[in-house]
Amino acid sequence: MNASTMNPSLSQTVGLYSPNAWVGIAFVTILLASLPALNLLFPAGHALHISSFAISLIGKFLCYALAALALDLVWGYTGILSLGHGLFFALGGYAHGMYLMRAAKPSPEILPDFMGFLSWKAFPWFWSFTEHFWYAMLLVVLVPGLLAFLFGYFAFRSRIKGVYFSIITQALTFAAMLLFFRNETGFGGNNGFTDFKKILGFDITSADTRAVLYWVSLATLLGALILARAITQSKLGRVLTAIRDSENRLRFLGYEPLGFKLFIWTVSAILCSIAGALYVPQVGIINPSEMSTENSIEMVIWVATGGRGTLIGPIIGAGTINGLKTWFTSVFPEFWLYALGLIFVLVTLFLPQGIVGLAKQLGQRIKVAK
């Protein structure tokens, strides 16, 4: 079979999930979607009230889950381990942050405070049109997508893979972080963007706006999960797993992996960027530390803990690890990195297929016992 005869159409997918899986996804989605309603409908002190802090925290976890899902597409299904997805996450956050910074002023022509400190008299050229929400959303997709496409094209064309590719992605992210730390770049230096006030004319700190941002994040995650499942269940998905298992054998059969790798790498980067764009208005800040290599490595741990190559697993892993992080950093903040490293070692040794793999094994044993 020749690559030119293969139609990677998603229409070839036969059933994305089983009926039971759809019921489970619907149940969890409805449960999560109801939380902001409990925050809005019931006053503080009521037994059913969910605090605004909890809504913001879970909304943040949803963004992390989307980033983990994006990483699973390239690592779990294509065998491309990226240690640079923190860059795409941050770029999406910065693209949205530029709009939020301009929306925070009485007039979009008023310079942010950090530009005033630098004695700048006008916006840099790359801030043009960022007072428009639609343009900022366009940047969220195009900037990381173009960067991923160009980087991926030269890397994959040169057949760089394995640990060498991982190191290069890490180096790219670190270089970008150093660049964004510089005040002259026009992105706020080490302080980044903060003090957001409005989004599309609405108060960004109000409970209603927080609820909408939460629901948009949840809907985006669900849509991304369906899209990722459609891709991985299609003929395209089978080619991706063939690249993961034996790229040389696939090439011997007549397929050229470059286009397939480039496609999924770019899609993954865009999804991760969207996660960053949703993250910023809920957290209220974006700075170069989001590009740190530690953040990218943490994403890998989310995927490994949940179970790579499962799509659902990375979502579970992101929620589990970040839930532990929230608790651990409030009790033993100085020991969190040690705990994170220990979790990764234990998962690698005892849960190589992650939480989802463990659940499947337990389910099979229960069936055998019956």
Image (cartoon, helix red, strand yellow):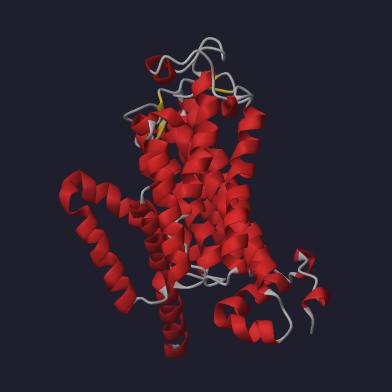
Residue 270 appears in the figure = yes
**In the displayed structure, would residue 49 be above or below residue 71?**
above
Q: Is residue 345 left or right of residue 42?
A: left
Q: Which quadrant of the figure has residue 230?
A: bottom right
User: Residue visible at 48% across and 31% down?
Assistant: 210
User: Residue visible at 53% across and 15% down?
Assistant: 122
**In the displayed structure, would residue 114 be above or below residue 189?**
above
Q: Is residue 185 left or right of residue 14?
A: left
User: Residue visible at 45% across and 55% down?
Assistant: 84
**Quadrant of the frame with the N terminus:** bottom right
**Quadrant of the frame with the C terminus:** bottom left
Extreme-right residue of the structure: 5
Number of labels in the image equals: 0
Q: Nearer the viewer, residue 288 or 225?
A: 288
Q: Is residue 348 left or right of residue 229?
A: left
Q: Nearer the viewer, residue 42 or 137?
A: 137
Residue 61: percent from the left, percent from the top? 42, 47
Residue 202: percent from the left, percent from the top? 55, 20
Residue 17: percent from the left, percent from the top? 64, 67
Residue 203 appears in the figure = no
User: Residue visible at 77% across and 76% down?
Assistant: 3
Residue 134: percent from the left, percent from the top? 66, 30
Q: Nearer the viewer, residue 152 or 21?
A: 152
